[in-house]
Image (spheres, rainbow, N blue to C red):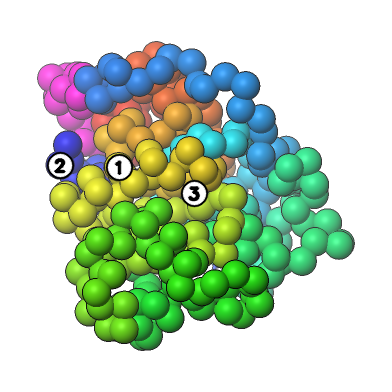
Amino acid sequence: MTQEPVTEEHRTVNADPTPSATDAAADKLRDVVADRETEGPTGNSTIFGLRGLTVYYADFRAVKEVTADIRENEITALIGPSGCGKSTVLRCFNRMNDLIETARVDGSLTYHGVDLYGKNVDPVEVRRRIGMVFQKPNPFPKSIYENVVYGPKIGGMKGNLDDIVEESLRKAVLWDEVKDKLDESGLALSGGQQQRLCIARAIATSPDVLLMDEPCSSLDPIATLRIEELMLELKQDYTIVIVTHNMQQAARVSDRTAFFTVDVSDDGQRTGKLVEFDVTNRLFTSPSKTETEDYITGRFG
Ligand SMILES: Nc1ncnc2c1ncn2[C@@H]1O[C@H](COP(=O)(O)OP(=O)(O)O)[C@@H](O)[C@H]1O
Ligand SMILES: [Mg+2]
């Protein structure tokens, strides 16, 4: 359960592994997914529909032609080697790429059937409904209370702010640890608590989706486990899309997993692409693509 994220070092080591090392990697993943469902929760409707989604940074095509359906109240994990476009795709879901001047999105991305990049869609409203949690916990240099009410205040949300604070912190399983020190700085908390505060801050605006970009990569194994448990609770109320470097984490928490990799063309152009998207158990135990098999067994990555 304390498997470290796959690092560049691991990848180099795994570049030419012995058969026993690769078998061990695959066995470990199989153990982790053994008790996961082989079918995703049925009947969950599509919340995001991606059709030929392609993202450019100026002339550089970072990721091409992603087609997938993300379902409500599921945890979807995006995995794959560094630079394959996981964060780029994640940022499309709440139009965070709009904030990058050179970024351009092609193809279509619908949210509840509505074109997310349509003319009448307000990106600010999109980001209220689709919250984001980043790799490094980033509380504002303000009190715990002010961190949580920040979004509701600027959004002019109705309702008692004290109630919003308590409810959000309870949902983030942080309330009991901080209820007597709401006036203290968010920055005085531990890393794991700061990340849960960021989750509470995202929850406070009543979103229906939480995007998480490697939310545990700066946390110790115990704090990581608490965030994973929290995610499993939160999916009752929210749809979660998580980017993770850690395959064990994807295997532990996600309902479905999308595996991305980088295509290198003859002229050396590197473009991210979605290789395989399936129910997590199946992707880790009987992937249909060799590229997926090679990645999860550590032969490539
Ligand atoms: N703001 C940006 N400007 C230009 N290129 C970028 C920017 N962000 C990411 N890229 C490039 O896009 C590709 C995909 O990056 P990213 O989505 O961050 O991959 P991942 O999250 O899978 O590591 C990489 O080649 C990266 O260098
Ligand atoms: Mg990334």
Of the pair 166 and 19, the residue shown nearer to us: 166
**Residue linked to disc 1:** 229
Marks 2 and 1 sit apart, C-alpha to C-alpha, by: 14 Å
**Residue linked to disc 3:** 86
Write the start and end of the magenta stretch as one range: 12-28
Q: Could you tell whether 37 is left or right of 185 in the image?
A: right
Nearer-N-terminus badge (2/3): 2
Q: Residue at x 44, y 61 (%)?
A: 168
Inspect the image, locate mark 1, and give the three-letter code of the amino acid beneath it. Answer: Glu
Foreground tag (2 vs 3): 2
Marks 2 and 3 sit apart, C-alpha to C-alpha, by: 23 Å
For the C terminus, the image quarter is: top left
Q: Note whether 256 is above or below 111 in the view shown.
A: above
Q: Is mark 3 within 8 Å of ligand 1?
A: yes
Nearer-N-terminus badge (2/1): 2
Q: Position of residue 293 (x, y in %)?
A: 37, 22
